[in-house]
Amino acid sequence: MELLNANLAKVEQLSRRLMDILGKHKPLRSELNAPETGMFVNAAAVYWQAMAENPGKVMESQLELWTKSVKHYVDAQHMLMQGKFAAPQDDTGEDRRFSHEMWRTNPYFNFIKQQYMRNKEAVETAVAGLEGLSVKERQRVEYFSQQITDMMAPTNFLGTNPAALEKAVETDGQSLVDGLENLIADLEDNNGELLVKLADETAFEIGVNIATAPGKVVYRNRMFELLQFTPTTETVHEIPLVIFPPWINKYYILDLKEQNSMIRWLTDQGYTVFVVSWINPDRSYSDVGLDTYIDEGFLTAIEQVKEITAQKQVNAVGYCIAGTTLHLTLALMKHRGDKSVKSATFFTTLTDFNDQGEFTPFLQNDFIDGIDREIEETGFLRSFIMQRTFSFLRSNDLVYGPAIKSYMMGETPPAFDLLYWNGDGSGLPGKMAHEYLRKLCQDNQFVTDGVEFCGERLHVSDVDVPTCAVTCETDHIARWKDCFNGFQMTKSRSKTFIVSESGHIAGIVNPPSKKKYGHYVNKDVSGSADDWMEGATFHEGSWWPRWDTWLSSRSGKKVEARQPGDSTHKVLEDAPGSYVRVRAIR
């Protein structure tokens, strides 16, 4: 009992510290926290119009909820009156948030769980019944109503979370002390804003136990460091491979550890592998736009690789936003008559943003206007804002679930390399963020009238090099069907399309040794995405060997393995270099 009282006293002290942090922090712009009031006004107007025109329909759904709620209460009381300390019949369905046994067996917790599930169902029914909203308005109402119901889940509150209460008792309150300390640490790391830490950052050190593929930095400018990795074979393909990772995160998603490193695997297949490691920008990069990424990033890297290897062409890879920008670069090269890229591979790459998918709630003017005002003030888009946005697309997995474990249960975040990488983000230069969100995402200029960069009007149909697109079946960021639509618009006469099982990361970082996720292929890319999948064949195992076959046929003869650098490109330092170690400004 003494330990419990001591820990409760610590909780009180920590609570005062918590309130002090919250009282001092400068909140984010309101536009970045919620949609404009007009969305709610429109939804409310539609609801009340439905009430006026068809009150019976609206009241029917309300009465259904009331009836179920009263029956649920009566059933629970009946069980208690019979002297049975047991939960009544539960027909609300499975939900992994309620996996603790007491949600099923304890009448108190089961009553709360059942009532929450019925309320959640009622909200979903009401939203689904709204008529008169535009498609985008409906998607936003659905998203934000889902956020409200997820936030109000009883698992998110100590008094109604049996697992958290159980641990608090078992540890004499130590779990609450540890949880508050975790919460305060996360708030301090983000200037008073809450972003749940997903991984134990003390468990990893870049270049020591993550991002360890041997190589050298052979070139550096203000935009990137060029890494050339040490060969592991006596001979290599003549034509080098240069990989452009997304600059929202760090390149080492392709080199987390030896067992799943794509970089190591590619060197083992006999490729001379170069990887661009992007700068983590600050205010001084405010005027850097997509044209700078194309010119000082993509084009410069390609030229440096050609010089180092004494080759006239390279094979290029673009991942996510870097794949989109590689398309822009290839379109520009077409206008200039530059044939430096022999083939291009795209990982989870969008070029057609006609259907914004799950990002629709965030790609409307109110939210983008808020981002514009943010970057006008700071000069760049903070990584924190992007991380939080991505997290709320999977709020139960990336926000509330981790928050419960960290803040209520007092657990240390896991030492998980993928989640560590996920938290090691980068900011975006102000001009680049504005151009990407307005010109590409909102206006979809690249696949409609064309978009102007580097003095040329660029269109996706300008791309005509042999292409291989790898997409992921359950990717919620770059949905495979949307990737297919843009892929079809290129004028390449040699097109290969692959759909890997799993999502945006696991579907790409899928080494053959794991024998985990399979993939779909279909040579006929002439029809719709549904047509393609209907005619596709499924193959067990990773797509990496299939891509290797495709890539090697476009990589020339074998030559003596190249060591990093050359006479005009002295080694600057060991991989992974300096830029990758720079943490984002919060």
Image (cartoon, rainbow, N blue to C red):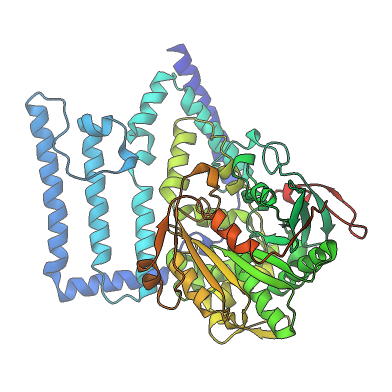
Dividing the picture into quadrants, the one containing residue 374 is bottom right
Which residue is situated farthest in the top direction here?
2
391 sits to left or right of 69:
right
Picture quarter with the N terminus: top left
Residue 163 in percent (x, y) is at: 36, 30
Camera-nearest residue between 448 and 524: 524
Taking the spot 11% from the left edge, 51% from the top edge, the residue there is 67
Dividing the picture into quadrants, the one containing residue 19 is top right
Residue 455 in percent (x, y) is at: 73, 85
Q: Is residue 60 above or below residue 444?
A: above
Camera-nearest residue between 506 and 32: 506
Which residue is situated farthest in the right direction here?
567
Camera-nearest residue between 433 and 535: 535
Taking the spot 43% from the left edge, 44% from the top edge, the residue there is 400
Residue 161 appears anywhere in the view = yes
Residue 376 appears anywhere in the view = no
Residue 105 in percent (x, y) is at: 22, 29
Residue 223 in percent (x, y) is at: 77, 62
46 sits to left or right of 436:
left
Q: Is residue 219 above or below residue 44?
A: above
Q: Is residue 247 above or below residue 300?
A: above
